[in-house]
Image: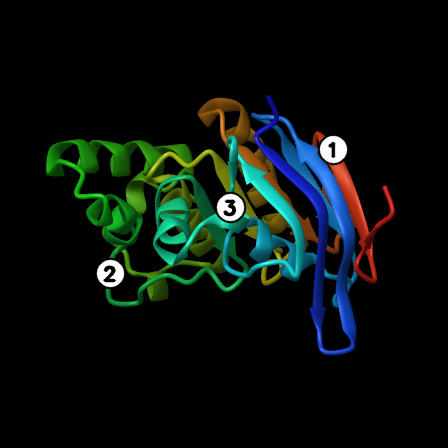
Amino acid sequence: MTLLTVTGVHRHFGTVHALNNITFSIEPGTLVALVGRSGSGKTTLLNIVGGLDRPDQGTVTIDGTDITTLDENGLSTLRRDTVSYIFQTFGLIPVLTAAENISVPLRLTRTNPHDRDKRVDLLLDLVGLGDHARQRPGELSGGQQQRVAIARALAASPRLLIADEPTGQLDAETGLAVMALLKGIVQTEGVTALVATHDPVLMALADHTLHITDGHLTS
């Protein structure tokens, strides 16, 4: 069974056709790159897949559930338990340490404190930041902040990881390291990842590539 199936999705903003009849599916445990120029529809598509926006037409099925039929409570549960986001702006809470930022999703699910701390330590080691647990975002480099954001997205063991140009604010070398980390996480954690990028170089690390141009999938 596929983890994600998008069928006939359309999204319009006034006279602008942001997405036109988008159809594709993703198998579990794969890293898929969504490639396209700025304004091609990447973010709109990610927002619909993640339940942040609704299509005007079409369906999005995640792990057997058509999320376009969910109410707001259902979508909140989806984003808490099944889907996690990584943004290019990191989105960390400045007053919290790296460990505290990673623990936020686990606090929302009221995970036992002992289990929560073990999971945070594991994730810090996974992203190579075991020695930076007590540092706040302002004390970390851009690449380190993005690693914390990745660890936080993985905290609640999501089935689907969505990343919207996660290397957009990083230099080329650091960006490739972050993408390689995502690739490794897909393999070790068994998560499925859909990663939007405008950098063709990063396509080489993906299992599959989807090209989007002016709201149309071209492959």
The residue that appears at 17% across and 43% down in the rendered structure is: 110
Q: Are marks 3 and 2 in contact (CB under 8 Å)?
A: no
The residue that appears at 69% across and 57% down in the rendered structure is: 42
* Mark 2 neighbour class, 10 Å CA radius: few under 14, some 14 to 19, many 20 or more: some
- Pick whichever, 113 or 41, lies toward us: 41
- Pick whichever, 44 or 66, lies toward us: 66
List the residue tagged with mark 2.
Answer: 96
Q: Position of residue 36 (x, y in %)?
A: 78, 55
Q: Residue furthest left?
A: 113
Amino acid, disc 2: Leu
* The quadrant where residue 123 appears: top left
Gap between marks 3 and 2, in whole Å? 32 Å
Q: What number is the disc on residue 67?
A: 3
- Pick whichever, 106 or 3, lies toward us: 3
First in residue order: circle 2 vs circle 1: 2
Secondary structure beneath label 2: loop
Q: Is residue 212 left or right of residue 106?
A: right
Q: Is residue 4 left or right of residue 148?
A: right
First in residue order: circle 3 vs circle 1: 3
List the residue tagged with mark 1.
Answer: 208
Which mark is nearer the camera, 3 or 2? 3
Q: Position of residue 75 (x, y in %)?
A: 42, 52
